[in-house]
Image: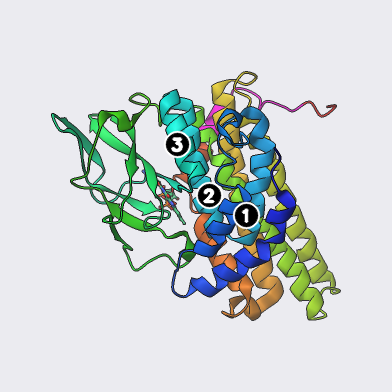
Amino acid sequence: MTFPFDALAACRAELEDEATVNDARAAFPTAGLDRLRQLGVLAAALPQTLGGLGFGTEPHGAAGLLHMLRLVGQGSLALGRVVEGHVNAIRLVALYGTPEQLAHVAAEVHDGALYGLWVTDGATPLRMDQTARGITLHGGKAFASGARHVTRALVTARAGQDVTRMLLVAMGAGRAVHDGGGGLTGMRGAGTGQCDLTGMTVLPSALVGQAGDYLRQPEFSAGAWRGMAVALGGIERLSALLRGQLAARGRAGSPAQQARIGMALIAAETALLWTRRAALLATGHDRFAAGDISATVNLARLAVERAGLEAIELVERGLGLSAFVRDNVVERIIRDLATYLRQPAPDETLCEAAAWFTQRDMPQPDIRA
Ligand SMILES: Cc1cc2nc3c(=O)[nH]c(=O)nc-3n(C[C@H](O)[C@H](O)[C@H](O)COP(=O)(O)OP(=O)(O)OC[C@H]3O[C@@H](n4cnc5c(N)ncnc54)[C@H](O)[C@@H]3O)c2cc1C
């Protein structure tokens, strides 16, 4: 079985159009998600033995997953974020859950389920209490993608002092979601919301893995490469729009604009090379030291962020005020990318990676291969 990359590439314009139409209302891209589901995007992450392609769950699937997330990101960063969370949740169940849990996930995904990974705590961090009736949850999650659309979420909950557990919770029609803080200015199609899980009771079989598994390295840091692949798609799309719009306005020939086109191409290629490098390390647990994997992926995260910020600046300076006009698709993609580039603790990420590689060299790829 192979993934229909050509069909996915062909529907990018459809995804982009829906993202543009939905932006003002911050509506969720239900048609785009259905399209991706039909193409097999949501099932691709499952292991091959469970009817998937191993994209995200098997080392050989990394290249395919990178290309799939990149293509979705080119069409819609918001949908890319939703798919990336879905893949991440499946991967964590595959890594730390039981075979029965993974088989159950696979059955649900083949049935159309959308998974989410909600770990960011809100004002009241999510806590779990074990009682005779099962596990009761208190508190909620912030910035939860697909808050009203995910059918099952993998959440982290505090189970005591410095103890974090993962749980799979079914999200039914009665879910308590609010937009919080007036809503985001970008990534408005990702359906991001604050989800209150207080009072929800789940069975002990909902627990995934052991205490501390979610934060276990190198997986905790290495997983960031999938978000980079989505951001890469947005950077590539902006770079293509810069070239196209400058040419359409007869401005592509000026030396200053040519320099911007060149720099935007370099930014996109830089993001691609770092993302591929991160994916290679992240899926090479048997070949690289855990610290090398985490630190390299952390550097890659910052490099992709820098490439994205540079692409935004080049597009804004190259297209001028037209990049700020609402009916130019560039305006929305810049808002989406700028928002998506805000990932947790960038200072710490850079400093930790720098400290790790101060006393040792970065693992080098064999460029003769
Ligand atoms: C569109 C979108 C969808 C998302 N979807 C999900 C989701 O589905 N599930 C989920 O769990 N999360 C989700 N998130 C949240 C995301 O994972 C991050 O938690 C969030 O983006 C962190 O951004 P931040 O800028 O607030 O990070 P912060 O970590 O608060 O960083 C902001 C700044 O503060 C600095 N800083 C951080 N900590 C400290 C400190 N202790 N002292 C001093 N400075 C500090 C940082 O270096 C940085 O300069 C989503 C976010 C977005 C934008």
Q: Position of residue 223 (x, y in %)?
A: 53, 37
Q: Which residues are magenta?
A: 352-365
- Residue at label 3? 105
Dot 3 amino acid type: Val
- Residue at label 2? 83
- Report the label total: 3
The tag earlier along the polypeptide, 1 or 3, is 1
Q: Position of residue 348 (x, y in %)?
A: 46, 40
Dot 1 amino acid type: Val
Q: Residue at x 70, y 37 (%)?
A: 1
From mark 1 to mark 3, how far is it between C-alphas? 22 Å
Asked if residue 310 is among those painted magenta in the image, a careful observer would answer no
Q: Is residue 97 visible?
A: no
The answer as to whether callout 3 falls within 8 Å of ligand 1 is no
From mark 3 to mark 2, how far is it between C-alphas? 15 Å
Q: Residue at x 26, y 44 (%)?
A: 125
Q: Quadrant of residue 14?
A: bottom right
Secondary element at tag 1? helix
Numbered circle sitting on residue 72 = 1
